[in-house]
């Protein structure tokens, strides 16, 4: 068991009420650096809600979330979102080419830095995409390729944690397995802490890692790998 | 006696003849079973009564020459415009009338001020023969722009919410994430104004210009007025839409650059 110093993210007493319904009823969890976690549970139990709270795409009703022992409310939210990347269930590509999609994080930061193509190709390769698709229109990619592009785009921000919200639900079984393998590789190569939500047990087993089961808005079980 | 350059007045008998022709048209509609007779009669009578009433009201207002009274008329016109715009929007939120009012006041106020005080140098500033028709024209045209701006920003944010969240997740501010929605709303609001500027004089002769020519004004003077009023309308629509889209946009985001699901 990793010691407290390696706690990357900690959830303390997290509750979330939505439309007068208590979706999360008091979640206490610790996520350690470089480890993999899979969150499972029935539909509507609050898995995606939990992920969205971690990178502050949403606010908890009560409780606190710590990132490297600092309350995330004390971290500038834009900085937090670059450190804690997220890949959504339905892939979204922006207008333009694959390259246009990848340089978005640079443009948002207004750093004036323009990455060269070789750097961008690295991100494509890390996500399991062919490096020569930089010039291709993003809207013409297959669903599987779009999801990998979403992954590559998240990696451009150099995150330390990667949240994956049912990333394979729009993919066929073969593409789903390939995506999980790419994500596993990222954990091995880059030491990314991974937190993946899925309702497919086979994907959970394929990724490996600690299995957190949510039920009725609470943590039911945590099975350590 | 008719003067070549003076406006020929119509008598109430002339109007009654016009109304009779409308009633005959309604009769024709009934004969042919077109089902429009009742609406035609009703709308003709309403046109008659409403415009006669407005005519007497305007005569009273113009004769009053009281700045407070004239300002009150402008305020009432603005109020009716706000109600009209708000009534056309599907998502009627608490703050909507206020942001519409603020935007239209700013847009119309700027245009009216520039035209009446800087270009025409009207004195006194409340001269009703100028102020009321000019304010009315600019407000009336800004109504459509304001409605389109709100409707478009609402629909853009709703339909592109996934894209917006994808930008936010990469560290975008709400302004960066929603900038294309704002651009789209601004473009949509300006389309009717730009279209009318494109075809004016070719496809249509505007009412103000026609009215001035009919009253004996030189056509060249009339077109100068028409040109400047169209520019001022475009300015008003642009300013109104810019302020309104940005204020409406803000309701969709929290101060922490989060898209508010309850606002969608």
Image: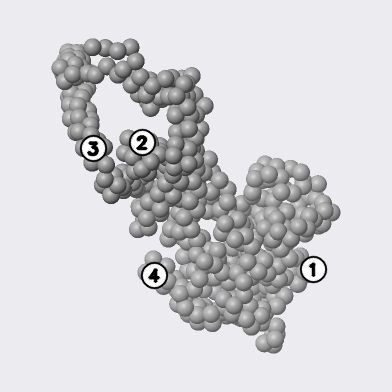
Image coords of residue B24 (percent x, y): 17, 14
Q: Which mark is residue B130?
A: 2
Q: Is residue A188 left or right of residue A220?
A: right
Cα gap from disc 1 to disc 4, whole angstroms: 41 Å
Where disc 1 sits, the SS reads helix
Depth order, front residue of A96/B23: B23
Rendered image quadrant of residue A82: bottom right
> Which element type, helix, strand or loop, lies under badge 2?
helix
Q: Given the current orientation, which residue lies at the most extreme right position?
A: A118
Q: Nearer the viewer, mark 2 or mark 3?
A: 3
Residue behind mark 1: A189
Q: Quarter holding the N terminus of chain A?
A: bottom right
Look at the numbered discs 1 and 4 and tell me whether their residues touch, using CB distance below 8 Å: no
Q: Is residue B212 above or below residue A73?
A: above
Residue placed furthest toward the front: B123
Badge 4 crowding class, 10 Å Cα cut-off, few under 14, some 14 to 19, many 20 or more, is few
Rendering quarter of residue A112 = bottom right
């Amino acid at each position: 068991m990793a010691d407290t110093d390696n706690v990357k993210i900690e959830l303390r007493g997290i509750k979330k009420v939505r439309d007068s319904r208590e979706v999360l009823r008091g979640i206490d969890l610790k996520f350690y650096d470089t480890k993999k976690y899979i969150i499972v549970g029935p539909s509507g139990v609050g898995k995606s809600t939990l992920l969205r709270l971690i990178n502050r795409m949403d606010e908890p009703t009560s409780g606190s979330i710590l990132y490297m022992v600092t309350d995330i409310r004390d971290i500038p939210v834009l900085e937090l979102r670059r450190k804690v990347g997220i890949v959504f269930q339905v892939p979204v590509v922006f207008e333009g080419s694959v390259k246009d999609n990848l340089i978005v994080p640079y443009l948002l930061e207004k750093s004036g830095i323009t990455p060269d193509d070789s750097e961008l190709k690295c991100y494509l390769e890390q996500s399991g995409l062919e490096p020569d698709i930089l010039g291709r229109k993003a809207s013409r990619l297959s669903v599987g390729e779009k999801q990998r592009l979403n992954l590559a785009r998240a990696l451009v921000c150099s995150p330390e944690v990667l949240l994956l919200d049912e990333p394979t639900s729009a993919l066929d079984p073969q593409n789903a397995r390939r995506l999980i393998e790419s994500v596993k590789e990222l954990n091995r190569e880059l030491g990314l802490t991974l937190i993946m939500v899925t309702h497919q047990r086979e994907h959970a087993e394929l990724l490996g890692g600690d299995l957190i089961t949510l039920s009725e808005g609470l943590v039911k079980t945590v099975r350590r790998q | 006696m008719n003067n070549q350059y003076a406006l020929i007045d119509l008598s109430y008998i002339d109007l009654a003849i016009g109304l009779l022709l409308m009633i005959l048209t309604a009769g024709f509609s009934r004969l042919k079973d077109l089902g429009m007779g009742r609406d035609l009669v009703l709308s003709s009578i309403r046109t008659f009564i409403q415009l006669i009433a407005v005519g007497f009201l305007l005569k009273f207002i113009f004769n009053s020459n009281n700045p407070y009274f004239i300002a009150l008329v402008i305020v009432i016109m603005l109020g009716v415009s706000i109600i009209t715009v708000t009534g056309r929007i599907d998502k009627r939120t608490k703050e909507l009338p206020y942001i519409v009012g603020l935007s239209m006041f700013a847009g119309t106020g700027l245009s009216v001020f520039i035209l009446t005080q800087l270009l025409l140098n009207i004195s006194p500033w409340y001269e009703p023969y100028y102020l009321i028709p000019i304010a009315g024209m600019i407000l009336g045209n800004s109504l459509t722009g304001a409605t389109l701006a709100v409707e478009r920003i609402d629909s853009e944010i709703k339909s592109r919410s996934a894209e917006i969240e994808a930008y936010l997740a990469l560290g975008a501010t709400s302004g960066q994430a929603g900038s294309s929605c704002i651009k789209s709303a601004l473009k949509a609001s300006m389309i009717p104004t730009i279209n009318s500027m494109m075809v004016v004089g070719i496809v249509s002769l505007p009412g103000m210009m026609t009215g001035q020519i009919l009253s004996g004004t030189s056509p060249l003077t009339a077109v100068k007025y028409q040109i400047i009023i169209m520019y001022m309308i475009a300015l008003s629509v642009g300013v109104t839409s810019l302020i309104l889209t940005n204020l409406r946009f803000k309701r969709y985001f929290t101060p922490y650059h989060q898209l508010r699901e309850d606002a969608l």
